[in-house]
Image: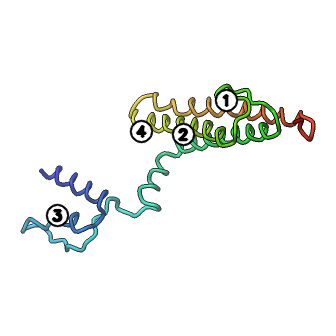
Amino acid sequence: MQARRFETVLFVVLVGGTSAFAQSFAPGQTQGKEEKIPAHAPIRAWSEPRFFGRLGHYIGTHKGLLAADAIVVLACSADAASTVHDVRAGFPETDPLLGTHPGAARTYALLEGEAVGVVAVNHVIANRVRHGHWRELVWPLAAGTAFGHAQATKNNADLANAAPWPPPH
């Protein structure tokens, strides 16, 4: 019974803060012999307040995952920017998903959508797989995606640098 009460108090504190409903579950409110806690006393989930609360805790405990996310997003963004630059300069795109002359919105939507998908898969792997080496799949997936887009960005930059200026129309 005591464990269930603690879970209820923890849930109410994390969801509702120190509202009157949460304070009604405070120890000492219903038993006469325990130490009395005033109704206005705050109930804390952590012993010390953290910078940004739960967000700061998540950042502190998932640094590697967030670094992998940043690498994937930056690689996809660089590929999209170099693709848009080359298409605006008059060069055809070779990616069959984009077509030969995609617009900037289409290019960014497809490549950033890929980044969102990889980031989502990384978070599912990191947060649902609790034990074993499967959690380490985050880095190979991020590195493979980043390497592929870095190669595409390099090809786009080489094409733009080798072309005469102004580009042919």
Q: For the residues carrying marks 4 and 3, which lies nearer the camera in this image? A: 4
Residue at 73% x, 37% y is: 83
- Front residue (pair 152, 14): 152
Instruction: Identify the amino acid type marked 2.
Output: Val
Sequence-first disc among 4 and 3: 3
Residue at 65% x, 43% y is: 105
Instruction: Identify the amino acid type marked 4.
Output: Asn
- Front residue (pair 36, 141): 141
Residue at 43% x, 61% y is: 50
Instruction: Identify the amino acid type marked 3.
Output: Pro
Neighbours of disc 2 within 10 Å: few (<14), some (14-19), many (20+): some
Neighbours of disc 3 within 10 Å: few (<14), some (14-19), many (20+): some
Q: Mark 3 points at which residue?
A: 27
Q: For the residues carrying marks 4 and 2, which lies nearer the camera in this image? A: 2
Real-space Cα distance between discs 1 and 3? 57 Å
Q: Name the residue under label 1.
A: 148
58 relative to 92, above or below = below
Q: Name the residue under label 2.
A: 116
Q: Name the residue under label 4.
A: 127
Left or right: 32 in relation to 137: left
